[in-house]
Amino acid sequence: MTTDYGELLRYVIVGGAGGIAQTHIQALAQTPGAQIVAISDLDEQKGSERAAQLGCAFFRDHQPMLAEFRPDVAVICTPHPSHAAIAIDCLRAGAHVLAEKPMAVEPAEGDAMVAAARAAGKILAVNFQQRFRPQIEFMKRFIEGGELGELVRVLMVAPWFRTATYYRSAGWRGTWKGEGGGVLLNQAPHNLDLLCHLAGMPTKVWGIASTRAHAIECEDTAQAMLEFANGAPGYLYGSTVETGKEILQIFGDKASLELSGDGVSVTRYEQPQSVFRASSPELWAAPQATTEHFSLSPGQGAQAIPAGGHGDHVAVHHDLRRAILTGSAPRADGQQAMMSLELANAIILSSHTERAIRLPVDRDEYHQLLTQLRSA
């Protein structure tokens, strides 16, 4: 059923007044019918300054803010270990929720958030703006249209270089209590989300998470071998030690996709590999293939990718508004956002237990591991 909010949706922002909240504020300024009515933040100076700039109310605690304003939407910008508790408070207060990534630190928290949204009849969305990149939309349409064929292999490399100064800038960075993980929970969630969004959720994970160079508790480097439902293998690597470029390759029976910069390379096989493999009389032959390049900046033979958006916070807020007003699902709801969290947790659990982990992750086992890591 469509909910009638008219033209106006009233927003509150929880946390992040000195950081990511500003990006949401700028996005809401470009979202029709969005009115920020209040901000809460534990940092009273930054929070009150931001509220004064916007001409809205300021609270140190989100609870009295929710009680007084009964907002339509709450945007959660606090550090992710607090996402679950705050999101549940907001949902129970009758607000739709947009949480920054990752949605939580462990799967049990994500389960509780999804359950609270269902019980309240409200939307829980997570800020995975890269799903709105035109290149990713192009790849998603290609796969859903059946042009890729059955999944054969996936490769993802995600360098997120960070300096020692970055980790020294805040005491919570790279700690089990402050973040609940390192590169897998802070820097790479977007990459993990895109992998699952496009290729699907792996069913088994062998992971290694290590601290190679930074003076932090959590992993600064992670790698994993993946197995998908049809037996297809995958590999991913993420690190704050190495600089370099992002790689995402998805190989199928009929074609393959490679994300590169602002474009996508598409290789199509004249005959599906499975058919050629079974029917060719040749010993060493391979199916003929043609490669096309699609780009946001077409040139030198590249074809254009339709640029419907920029994969930014504006796209996320417009999508959430559409979902609220039409009663439909946002592109990255709580259940969708659970995939990248499950994958990150599976890599950490596999690394610490030195065994393969089947998904979904065992909630109790992971909670026990995280408790041990936080108390060490």
Image (spheres, rainbow, N blue to C red):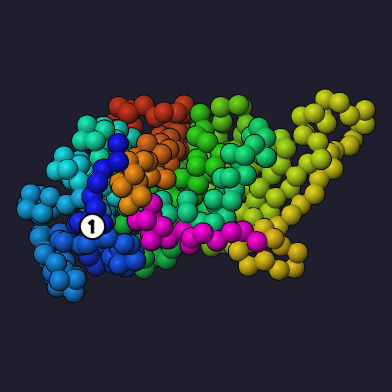
* Residue 198 visible, this angle: yes
Quadrant showing the N terminus: top left
**Whether residue 343 is situated above or below residue 132 in the rendered picture:** above
- Residue 106, image quadrant: top left
Tell which of 359 and 137 is nearer to you.
137
* Residue 188 visible, this angle: no
Q: Amino acid at mark 1?
A: Leu
Reading the image, the residue beneath label 1 is 8
Q: Residue at x 10, y 59 (%)?
A: 60
| Residue 77 rendering spot, x and y as whole percentages | 26, 56
Q: Residue at x 76, y 29 (%)?
A: 274
**Whether residue 366 is situated above or below residue 41 in the rendered picture:** above
**Horizontal placement of 55 versus 150: left or right?**
left
Q: Residue at x 62, y 59 (%)?
A: 305
| Residue 86 rendering spot, x and y as whole percentages | 19, 46
**Horizontal placement of 340 versus 114: left or right?**
right
Quadrant showing the C terminus: top left
Q: Which residues are magenta?
A: 304-319
Q: Is residue 308 magenta?
A: yes
**Whether residue 144 is situated above or below residue 133 in the rendered picture:** above
**Whether residue 153 is situated above or below residue 218 in the rendered picture:** above
| Residue 65 rendering spot, x and y as whole percentages | 10, 54
Q: Residue at x 60, y 64 (%)?
A: 296
